[in-house]
Image: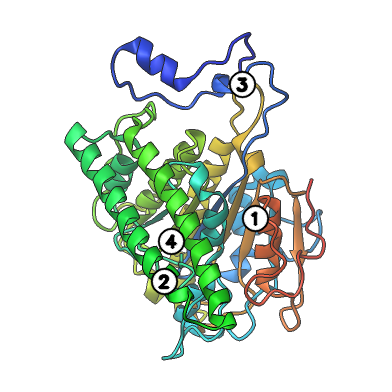
Amino acid sequence: MNFITKSCLSRRTLLKQGGIALALPWLESMQAAFAATPVQPRRFICVLNYFSFHAPNFFPKEAGVAYTPSPYLDIIKEHRDDFTVISGLNHPEVRDGHSSDRSFLTGTPHPGSPSFRNGISLDQLLAEKIGSQTRFPCIAMAQGSGTSFSYSRSGVAIPAEPSVARMFAKLFINGTPAEVQAEVERIRQGRSILDRVGEEARAMKRDVGAADREKLDQYFTSVRELEQRMVTAEDYARRPKPNPGITPLKDPAPGEKTLSFGLNLQLAQIAFQADLTRLATIYYIGTTNTPSKPGESFAYHDLSHHGQDGGKIDKLTLLERDVMTECGKFLGRLKMPNESGSRLLDNTITVVGAGMGNASSHDATNLPILVAGGGFKHGQHIAHDPKSPPPLCNLWVQIARQMGIDVARFGTSTSSEIPGFESA
């Protein structure tokens, strides 16, 4: 809601007047009074489908705005003007089958190599810049495992939360006073460690050469930024969490990973709405049960290696149609206008994709990429020649810049944009 009143309504005032630690949602009426049209923050969510999408069902046959929807795009046709499909993209020197997922948001070459060391993923690059503006810099979710495609600057995988119930509790359920104090104490201990390390590094700086002093200066900058984030984290730890307005979500039964995926999307949407975070990743790793055929059992991995077997492709299509249905529901929720008429979708860049273009042959070219919302011009299929495409990292640079982050290069990028993909 976006009410313009003669006074600025603060959360602290409401909490004091309520006389109790109420868990309040973020209200747009808490914007400064008589402010100009509020600048809505940009948000980013990326969905990675580990077993990819069957390409003939995903990509339209025609390029441009007059394309005929493919079977999967037909499921979300009501959102046609709000998304763009891009074909032909891939990461140079990433041809490593299932291991290619590691490089999806980083572009780091040769993820299947024994000596592979990953780089920072796009979501974490964004988190370094804007993560301190929200309670949670970024959230990562998966179904049934902690597998993630988010990587820190040092190339360490950031575990994803596999439990819907635990993620709901993390986002929306307040701890006891003792639990809150314990969290604050952990943050303070982390800051104390940084202080000691910083003192040792400053002492070392007097005894090293110019090149090493430059490295230490970069280190100090990183430490100062981390200290600032930890101060913010301590402040957030003391604040009550918002009320999502729904009953706590529970984990679906084992094998119901498509249902879990839909709940992951719902959690991301509510977290965005409450401005708990502006960055999210969801790793979809397949399922044995699917909503449209509750009485049947599936093996996503086996079906993805269909070898053009018509029966396997039919069952694979059932699975992937249900995945696209959940994505469509998510876009629909983002499009629901609030009382001021604005839509969360317009400021939320949503990417749905995969690290393989053809899971049956482990081919990592012609990756399925769908981008929705986020202030881009949509409603088209942008087709590139898979034999000579721009790097996928060009899109990552373009998204970072759309998020307000001044990035010149990222990963294997050669440009700051994808030809034909423009801001609205």
Q: Residue furthest front?
A: 206
Total numbered labels placed on residues in the image: 4
Residue 98 left/right relative to 172: right
- Three-letter residue code for mark 1: Val
Cα–Cα span, label 4 and label 1: 16 Å
Cα–Cα span, label 1 and label 3: 33 Å
Cα–Cα span, label 2 and label 3: 46 Å
Q: Secondary structure at mark 3?
A: loop
- Three-letter residue code for mark 3: Ala
- The residue at the point 48 percent across, 27 percent down is 26
Cα–Cα span, label 1 and label 2: 49 Å
Q: Quadrant of residue 285?
A: bottom left
Q: Which label belongs to residue 160?
A: none
Dot in front, 1 or 3: 3
- Three-letter residue code for mark 2: Ala
- Three-letter residue code for mark 4: Tyr
Residue designated by label 4? 283
CB of mark 1 within 8 Å of CB of mark 2? no
Q: Which label belongs to residue 203?
A: 2
Q: Which label belongs to residue 371?
A: 1
Q: Which label belongs to residue 32?
A: 3
Picture coordinates of residue 119, whole percent (x, y): 52, 74
Q: In the picture shown, does residue 21 fall above or below 45?
A: above
Q: Is residue 165 visible?
A: yes
